[in-house]
Amino acid sequence: MPVAGIEPSTIHDNFDEMRGGATRRHEALDILAPRGTPVVAADDGAVKKLFTSVPGGLTVYEFDPDQRYCYYYAHLDAYAPGLHEGQLLHRGELVGYVGTTGNAPKDAPHLHFAVIHLDPDKRWWTGTPINPYPLLHKAP
Ligand SMILES: [Zn+2]
């Protein structure tokens, strides 16, 4: 569970919702939480890329140790102090804080969380999104 203090049974599956004027699927989960709530690593891995984008705001791309999956965290209010590319993360370690950077509504802080199955060339910006809801929903 990538947001501290969230009860898994309370999250909603919004992976298939249409966004951007119904032109694209969401392909991620939005996990609502108060601004400043700790965002933590969903799995062990390494910080592959810290990136600021117009839609995502402050974002983190984390690759799992086998480089099969990329975990994407967006709309962060701030990064964890000292967070840098190449840093190894353990599951549960602080990544940043919930916020509304990018295109998130200013009155609805949330973590936009995606899991992407990486292509063979392991590029952080491409891959196939998979729905993390079934895994998170039944997380202990
Ligand atoms: Zn979202």
Image (cartoon, grey):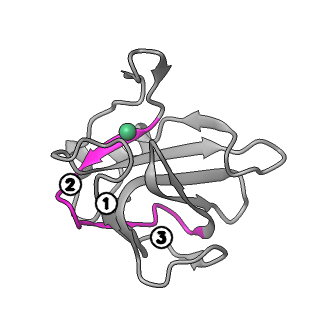
Q: CA distance from mark 1 to mark 2?
A: 8 Å
Please tell me how many numbered marks the rendered image carries: 3
Earlier along the polypeptide chain: callout 3 or callout 1? 1
Label 1, residues with CA under 10 Å away: few <14, some 14-19, many ≥20:
many
Question: Which residue is located at x 51 percent, y 63 percent?
Answer: 43
For the N terminus, the image quarter is: bottom left
| Mark number, residue 33 | 2
Give the mark toward the camera: 3 or 1: 1
The image quarter in which residue 13 lies: top left
- Residue 89: percent from left, percent from top: 54, 75
Earlier along the polypeptide chain: callout 2 or callout 3? 2
Q: CA distance from mark 3 to mark 1?
A: 12 Å
Kind of residue at badge 3: Arg
The image quarter in which residue 37 lies: bottom left
Kind of residue at badge 2: Ala
Question: Which residue is located at x 47 percent, y 45 percent?
Answer: 54
Instruction: From the image, tell me which residue sits under label 3.
Output: 91
Q: Secondary structure at mark 2?
A: loop
